[in-house]
Image (cartoon, rainbow, N blue to C red):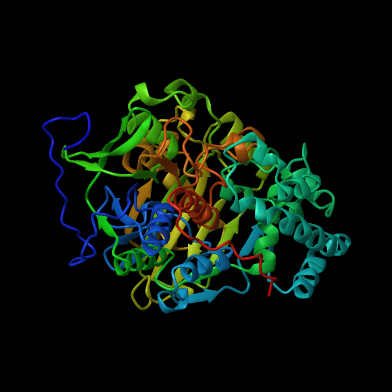
Amino acid sequence: MFPGDQGHMFRRIPNRITQGTMIDMKKTHVVIVGAGPGGLTAGMLLAHRGFRVTIFEKADNVGGRNAALRLGPYTFDTGPTFLMMKFILDEMFTEVKRNSADYLAFRKLEPMYRLSFRGRTLAPVTDPETAAAEIGKLFPDDAPGYGRYFTRERDRFRRLYPCLQKPYSRLRDYLHPDLFKAVPHLALGKSLHANLGRYFTEEDLKLCFTFQAKYLGMSPWDCPALFTIISYIEHAYGIYHVMGGLSEISEAMAKVIGEEGGQIQLGAPVRRVLVENGSATGVELMNGEKVAADEVIINADFAHSMTHLVDPAHLRRYRRERIDAMAYSCSIFMLYLGIDKQYDEPHHHILFADDYRANVDDMTKRKVISEDMSVYVRNAAVTDDRTAPAGHSALYILVPAPNNTSGIDWNREKQAFRDKVIRQVMRKTSMKDLDQHIQAEKIISPADWETDYAVKFGAVFNLAHNWSQLLYFRPHNKFEDFDHCYLVGGGTHPGSGLPTIYESARISSNLISKRYGKHFPKPLPLPEAP
């Protein structure tokens, strides 16, 4: 019976992914709320280390925002489409004595993407000499700056990388030698855009190295300069596609969890985290069932969790008023289109607004709908025939948009905005007849992210990554408000994006393992760029 809840007996739901696994009830039990990338990574690591792992996922498939989205014969990634720092994903599989290539088929993209801005295009590659030469064709005066950019940002990344693999649960963690060495390289007080002014003078060229602020849901004029390393990481280590879509990563992790004896319960939403005497003791499911746990990991959207999954009586630091007052990323307006035609378009194509600064300010400051918006289009069928039938395409179209603190009524606006996006894509790409070939379609608006996907304010890139919400000042991997609870995902350290979410899962898994005296390997050093 559950401590403090007399009359409720525990009952285990039949596992819907890993049938036939024998469960050792004597093992330390870790319950994970959510089968997103962070929850699956933690489940994989902890199951391999000998913990009894149960993951409860409200949806009927794994992955969360990294899940597959299917419209008839067309397959899309719901969320992430760029796989950066593939070596981190590889390392997670190595830690559980497996090879990622045995579960996933990777394709490195060269060029990485096409960037289109004010009538010009640039298609960056990962060979530094070739990249510099291509930049020189469009921006002759700035070509020498690329070498300075590459060298300086490589050094910055090498200094910062170890800091992304450590928890910052105490202020004295700032005294760690790795962070001490990195501090001079943080470019404190500078924005990403200002930092790029050290290398380039042409505004359009700066944009080619600042759009990555989108991965954090921030304006490059506000995003801390340290995040210049994101574009460096792309240029140095490349971008990968996973055949079938990046959602296949989640499916592969779920398979490993089953092989390691872990349990994943689909269609099993959690109502609340159970807390007693200042410690998490398990979870209650929506069907009223209570499941005891020695440790609870929350992989749901952090702000949503604090306002929906935890009784306010158990919160001290993260009460509703503080959650509402925190800084949040932007949102995105999504179009998933099944097309009965193939276009000569690149795998990734980023179309900059003609006035990019105004568009970004509309999104992050004024919080209004832009007339001239930036658009990202993924045309995966040119690389991957598993995403659409022969001769067809599965187009993923993303438009950064204000989060729901804007007050925009997306139920009223979304159809007109959808039409505007289609016209923008037809105007700026070779897909001039796109509107005549749509066979399947789904829209996810910022409002839908909040109501259907439980993302606070529809802020899909989670809490903003400003200095007041980084490192120690971001929600801790070991949750502060009560014991035996840990966080994984974009809302905790080190932040948003698949590689950093994997690292958040490893940090939390290591903290749990340390608590129980379980051995775990140290993270590998940063590999040299190819």
Give coordinates of residue 352: x percent, y percent. Answer: 63, 52
Q: Nearer the viewer, residue 61 or 410?
A: 61
Q: Quadrant of residue 284?
A: top left
Q: Nearer the viewer, residue 317 or 241?
A: 317
Give coordinates of residue 85: x percent, y percent. Answer: 59, 64
Total number of numbered discs in the rendering: 0
Give coordinates of residue 219: x percent, y percent. Answer: 64, 41
Quadrant of the image containing the N terminus: top left
Q: Quadrant of residue 526?
A: bottom right
Give coordinates of residue 92: x percent, y percent. Answer: 49, 65
Q: Nearer the viewer, residue 237 or 172?
A: 172
Quadrant of the image containing the C terminus: bottom right
* Residue 437 visible here: no
Q: Residue at x 48, y 74 (%)?
A: 382
Q: Quadrant of residue 410?
A: top left
Q: Is residue 189 left or right of residue 264?
A: right
Q: Residue at x 75, y 49 (%)?
A: 182
* Residue 408 visible here: yes
Q: Is residue 153 left or right of residue 317?
A: right
Residue 456, compared with residue 64, is above or below; it is above
